[in-house]
Image (cartoon, rainbow, N blue to C red):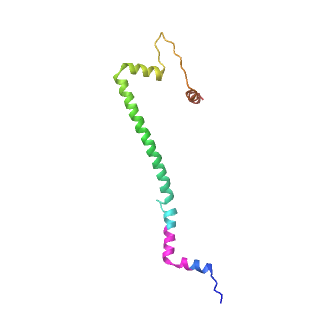
Amino acid sequence: MVIRFNFKDKIRSIFRNKYVLTIIIFVVWVTLLDSNNLITRYKDMKDMHKLKINREYYIKRIEEDKQKLHELKTDNHNLEKFAREQYRMKKPDEDLYIILTPSEDRKITRKNK
């Protein structure tokens, strides 16, 4: 007496089970068809992580700018220093020499193109 294992019949019996069928439909629905599916949630979580990093950067930048603004409003020496460095202002009897690092030079040439 030889007992044969019929694989097709075993699979059919599994899929005829209403609980297994319900679980399969639920998994497909949650992963692909729902508006809040797993793929969308993963992408949203990645975007949220990037936004948190950007938020931290901008908060830090705002604090630095507030500090610079306070220094400019309180001290005329800092105001003159800022004008000379940022806007390359000079007194009439002065000569101005600008020394750029290679990275600064690349930035300027990219902006001009």
Q: Where in the figure is residue 68, as x and y percent of width and height?
A: 39, 28
Residue at the spot 34% in from the left edge and 23% down from the top edge = 74
Outermost front residue: 1
Q: Residue at x 35, y 24 (%)?
A: 73
Quadrant into which the N terminus falls: bottom right
Measured as percent of width and height from the top left, residue 105 is found at 57, 26
At 54% across and 21% down in the image, what residue appears?
A: 99
Q: How many marks?
A: 0
Q: What stretch of residues is rendered in magenta?
A: 13-26
Q: Is residue 10 left or right of residue 80?
A: right
The relative height of residue 73 versus residue 34 in the rendered view (above or below) is above
Residue 16 magenta-highlighted: yes
Residue that lies at the very extreme toward the right in this rendered image: 2
Residue under the image location 37 percent in, 31 percent down: 66
Q: Position of residue 81 (x, y in %)?
A: 43, 20
Q: Is residue 42 left or right of residue 77?
A: right
